[in-house]
Amino acid sequence: QSALTQPPSASGSPGHSVTISCTGSSTDIGRYDFVSWFQQHPGKAPKLILYEVTKRPSGVPDRFSGSKSGNTASLTVSGLQTEDEADYFCSTSAGTDTYWVFGGGTTLTVL
Amino acid sequence: QVQLQESGPGPLRPSETLSLSCSVSGASIRSPGYYWTWIRQHPRKGLEWIGYITHSGTTYSAPSLTSRVSFSLDSSKNQFSLRLTSVVGADSSVYYCARDGASVGLDVWGRGTTVTV
């Protein structure tokens, strides 16, 4: 599996929406729904915000949503808030009993 | 509430062996259904999956690290550990332990520990 491709940066204004893409291949994102997204604030550990493309762990606001089309997964953050400024990483695996690969990360700036 | 906490060494010299432990609270590492995982993050922010060990001791590691990495469980301490031999400068990273709940993914992470070679 190769690393996933994310844009290095994204930005949006408070209250607006932003979408971050994550491109893989037909053997990972294109074939399986094991796509996760993580949020990481500076100096902190990554936090899971989406799994299986669209599912949110308990406590994650519904402003965070996910989708997938072909070999590309997307994270949309709606109603941007200043605390959403962070790095966002996507990840996927080729099923269970195998390993995870990550995107290079996208730095989200809330202007 | 499940919590993980890494503990590790001070600075290492090239060719030495890195040993890290992850203490788990709020869950038993012997409970089936989880993959106790190690991940590292390089200074320029990229995340790299290292490998995991299951409740039964089954392990799996990233192909690029298989020859140097091993994992173990210590049920008495509810800990799992990573051992990476022959370290080089490129192994300098923040190392995280995490719980992989299979379909749920990497849902609980430790705070990370910095390893410098």
Image: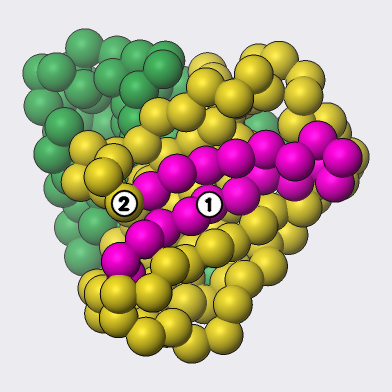
Chain colours: A green, B yellow
Place residue A97 in its image quadrant: top left
For the N terminus of chain B, the image quarter is top right
Residue located beneath label 1 in the image: B82
Q: Main secondary structure of the magenta part?
A: strand
* Residue shown at 42% from the left, 39% from the top: B51
Q: Is residue B79 magenta?
A: yes
Q: Residue B30 carries which label?
A: none
Q: Residue A50: image x %, image y %?
A: 52, 35
Per the rendered image, the range of residues in magenta is B69-87
Chain under label 1?
A: B
Q: What element carries label 2?
A: loop
Place residue A87 in its image quadrant: bottom left
* Horizontal side, residue A73 vs residue B104: left or right: left
Residue located beneath label 2 in the image: B68
| Disc 1 packing (10 Å; few <14; some 14–19; many ≥20) | many
* Residue shown at 67% from the left, 62% from the top: B6
Q: Does the magenta stretch include residue B98?
A: no
